[in-house]
Amino acid sequence: MIVYNKTNKIKIAGKVERADTFFKRLFGLIPRKNLDIDEGLFIPRCSMIHTCFMRFPIDIVFLDGENRVVFIESFLGPWRFSKLVFKANSVLELKAGVAQRKIGVGDSLQFYHAKEGSNLLPESIWAGNARQS
């Protein structure tokens, strides 16, 4: 997926994976040695995360049901727990420092799914209701 900040009109990340299965949610970014500046992980139905067993810090962007940013936690290091954000419906994990430069609380994010050989298609992903392709 591609994540775009509609408020600032900038691309946030171009290689975002969706943690939509039990094992993707269980392991998240744990197996990774690092995260590139253009990569991220989207976790639907989530309002708190941990970085246990991770090897690098991340930024956590908490989104409501309309994909508006309700809270950002920057540079959360390994073996830490984020705040529980009651207003959050999903979480976007990014390389540490990316959120600080590209996202603000109140910004509206849009997610796109790029199919090979086609144009970018908007994707409604809140509450885990992604369009199936």
Image (tube, rainbow, N blue to C red):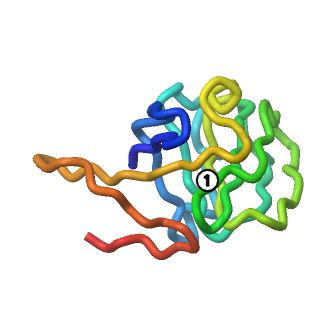
Reading the image, the residue beneath label 1 is 28
Is 57 situated left or right of 23 in this image?
Answer: right
- Give residue 56's position: percent from left, percent from top: 71, 30
* Residue occupying image coordinates x 85% and y 42%: 79
- Give residue 74's position: percent from left, percent from top: 78, 34
Check disc 1: other Cα within 10 Å, few if <14, some if 14-19, many if 20+. Answer: many
- Give residue 103's position: percent from left, percent from top: 64, 35
Please determine whether, in this image, residue 113 is positioned above or below residue 31: below
Please determine whether, in this image, residue 55 is positioned above or below residue 69: above
Q: Quadrant of residue 47?
A: bottom right
* Residue occupying image coordinates x 87% and y 50%: 81
Q: Quadrant of residue 33?
A: top right
Please determine whether, in this image, residue 44 is positioned above or below residue 92: below
Quarter of the figure that contains the C terminus = bottom left
- Give residue 131's position: percent from left, percent from top: 35, 72
* Residue occupying image coordinates x 70% and y 27%: 100
Tally the numbered discs: 1
* Residue occupying image coordinates x 14% and y 50%: 118
Q: Quadrant of residue 57?
A: top right
Q: Identify the secondary structure beneath mark 1.
A: loop
| Amino acid identity at mark 1 | Gly
